Amino acid sequence: MAHSESQVALNGTQISYIGHDAEEIPHFLGDTYGQFAKRLDLSFNQLRSLAGLKMFTELEELVVDNNQLGNDLQLPRLPNLHTLTLNKNQLTDIEALLEHLADVTPSLQYLSLLGNEACPNQLISPDKDEDDYQRYRYFVLHKLPQLKFLDSRKVTKKELMEGQARGAFMKVVKPKSEAQTAIRKKGNSLCTTWRKKKPCNEPGFENRPLPYTPLPRGSRDAKNHKGVFAKSHYIYYGKHSEGNRFIRNDQL
């Protein structure tokens, strides 16, 4: 136990237990510091659960960046917690997380979720842009209107008003689960294997059914495709369109 306590950085009511590859909060932390700790930093571990926080009854700030916390994250009720940073974890379900935080952290004012798939930003998702991130902020503020800071930016009055007015309709779509991704990868692997076993120049390949296409049957053969380029003349005979301005009187 003495060796374990030597790995703890103590500064008054601030406790740091950083970079020890712990998968759960060690019991000695709660037993030794839980009754008076106001700030707890557990960054750069391998935490998958925060069940050990039930001993930290006076906690006001919690930092658990760079861990392995997922959608099954459960916090005990922490009525005094005003700061929570969950950067760079494995969180994907933003709605479930926010509803849980609204229930167990009523005093929360600062929340940071950067580096999680649940937080759409270009740091982790190159296909996302500022509009995606702004919609995410509106949704978070709809669920947690008491926030003063979200991620690295202060919450503005305009954002808060927009979040209350339209945030409910800006839910961030949950990314595909790992199981779905694995199935897709397996399917792609099977397709690749089939192509290797059945190359295009082998007999029978040309009889393989092609995917659906609206093209005429004579145009579906990739080896005998013919394109047509020519002028075409169409006359519109309708009566309820702006196109009527371009129809001559003798065509009415």
Image (cartoon, grey):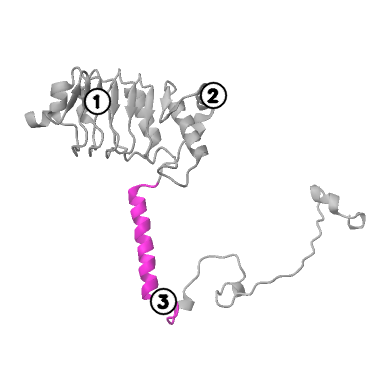
The Cα atoms of the two marked residues, 1 and 2, are separated by 32 Å
In the rendered image, the quadrant that contains the N terminus is: top left
Sequence order check, earlier mark of 2 and 3: 2
Position above or below: 50 against 234: above
Residue 208 visible here? yes
The Cα atoms of the two marked residues, 3 and 1, are separated by 60 Å
- Tell me where the magenta segment starts and ends, as one range: 176-204
Foreground label between 3 and 1: 1
Q: Is residue 86 magenta?
A: no
Sequence order check, earlier mark of 3 and 1: 1
Extreme bottom residue here? 203
Residue 1 visible here? no
- State the mark number for residue 231: none
Position above or below: 192 against 224: above
139 left or right of 236 in image: left
Disc 3, SS: loop
Report the magenta stretch's main SS: helix
Sequence order check, earlier mark of 1 and 2: 1
In the rendered image, the quadrant that contains the C terminus is: bottom right
Q: Is residue 194 magenta?
A: yes
- State the mark number for residue 158: 2
Foreground label between 1 and 2: 1
**Image location (x, y in percent) of residue 66:** 29, 38
Would you say the residues marked 3 and 1 are in contact, meaning their CB atoms lie under 8 Å apart?
no
Q: Amino acid at mark 2?
A: Lys
Q: Amino acid at mark 1?
A: Leu
Residue located 30% across and 17% down the image: 80
Label 1 sits on residue: 40
- State the mark number for residue 199: 3
Which of the two residues, 47 or 247, is positioned nearer the viewer here? 47
Residue located 18% across and 37% down the image: 20
